[in-house]
Every structure is written in structure tokens, then in C-alpha cells.
Image: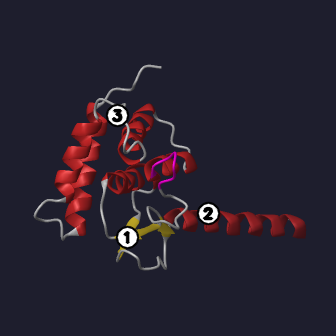
Amino acid sequence: MSSIGKILFIFWIVLLVNTVAAEDEKLVFSTWDTFEVDKCASIWLIKRYISPQAEIRFFKKGEPITEGIEFDTPSAKFRRYHNQSTFETLLEHYKLKEEKLIYLGQIIHDIEVNIWEKKIMAETPDLEKTVNAIISSPNKEYKEYIVEQCYQYFSKYESAKTPVPK
């Protein structure tokens, strides 16, 4: 093998090792320790579709986020805007285009962005009521409880829905 061939071989090995190591890295997503429907749905989306091994870290409301990928805070890239929920910004960034996710995004949009208008989606009131009940439950002091209950709810909700016809 020529010296150029050896160099290329070593380069590809290093590249392969770095790729495998990067895939094994656990992503960290960070937010404040307050809950609402959009945040709960976004945590579910992260753990279900974006990075199942992701760690969600919570900071006290108002504290600067010092580690991880910030979401659902005023300075985060992934947050509510005048025309998108946090959930929708995550869908867009990670190029998630499954019909069920888009449909759920429309419901979250209806709750989070369409605040004062008449609700567009028929499921909006029930979903909002159910998630708010989880958030305000007697176990609300335990972030892990809220995250787990919301994860279970959105997973059941997703599996119960059929794709929306185009």
C-alpha cells in the first residue's frame, strides 16, 4: 500500500471512529422548571423522535441555561414565536414530517399560539385539559412524574390517531 493509500486509510478509520462516538453521545436539552402543554409535548417529541436517549435538564425559571440545547425559554432557538409553538420549531429544525406529528403540532399551535381566537382543532380543548390536569396534579412538585405522565399521554394519543387525509 502506498503512503497516500495508508494516509487515506487512517483518515477513514479516524472519521469512522468519530462518527460512531458522535452517535453514541447523549444529547442534553435544557429548559426552565415550569410546565405547560407546549413544553410537555416538546419533551415527548425530543424523547420519542429526536433523541430517545436525551437527557432533559431543568433550571429554575429565570436562571440562565448554562448547558445543553436550550428550548422553551425566551432566548432559546427552539421556543414559541408569534407564528409557531416550540413543538413546531423542533419539528421544522429536525425535519420531522410524519402526518401524525404535523397534526399534533397543529393542536399545540392552537393552544400555544392561537390563544385568544376560537380554537380550530376539535381535539384542542380535551388535550389541553388533560395535560393541564397532569401538570397541576398533587405530584406536580416532581418533574420526573410530570415528564413521565405526559410522555405516556402523548404516546397513547399518537397511537390512537390515524393519519389525517391530504
Q: Is residue 82 magenta?
A: yes
Secondary structure at badge 2 equals helix
Q: Measured along the vertical axis of the image, is residue 117 above or below residue 82?
A: above
Which residue bears the numbered disc 3?
Answer: 118
What type is the residue that disc 1 sits on? Trp
Disc ID at residue 19: 2
N-term mark: 2 or 1: 2
Q: Give the number of the mark in front: 2 or 1.
A: 1
Q: Are marks 1 and 3 in contact (CB under 8 Å)?
A: no
* Cα gap from disc 2 to disc 3, whole angstroms: 48 Å
What type is the residue that disc 3 sits on? Lys
Where is residue 160 shown, x and y percent of the image?
26, 32
26, 87: nearer the viewer: 87
Which residue bears the numbered disc 1?
Answer: 32
Where is residue 22 shown, x and y percent of the image?
57, 66
Label 1: how many Cα within 10 Å (few below 14, some 14–19, many 20+): some
Point out the stretch of residues depicted in magenta: 80-85
Label 2: how many Cα within 10 Å (few below 14, some 14–19, many 20+): few
Q: Measured along the vertical axis of the image, is residue 5 above or below residue 118?
A: below
Q: Splitting the image into 4 quarters, where does residue 73 fall?
A: bottom left
Q: Are marks 2 and 3 in contact (CB under 8 Å)?
A: no
User: Can residue 2 be seen?
Assistant: no
Q: Is residue 36 found left or right of 129 in the rendered image?
A: right
Q: Is residue 128 found left or right of 74 in the rendered image?
A: left
**Residue under the image location 69 percent in, 69 percent down:** 14
What type is the residue that disc 2 sits on? Thr
User: Can residue 142 be seen?
Assistant: yes
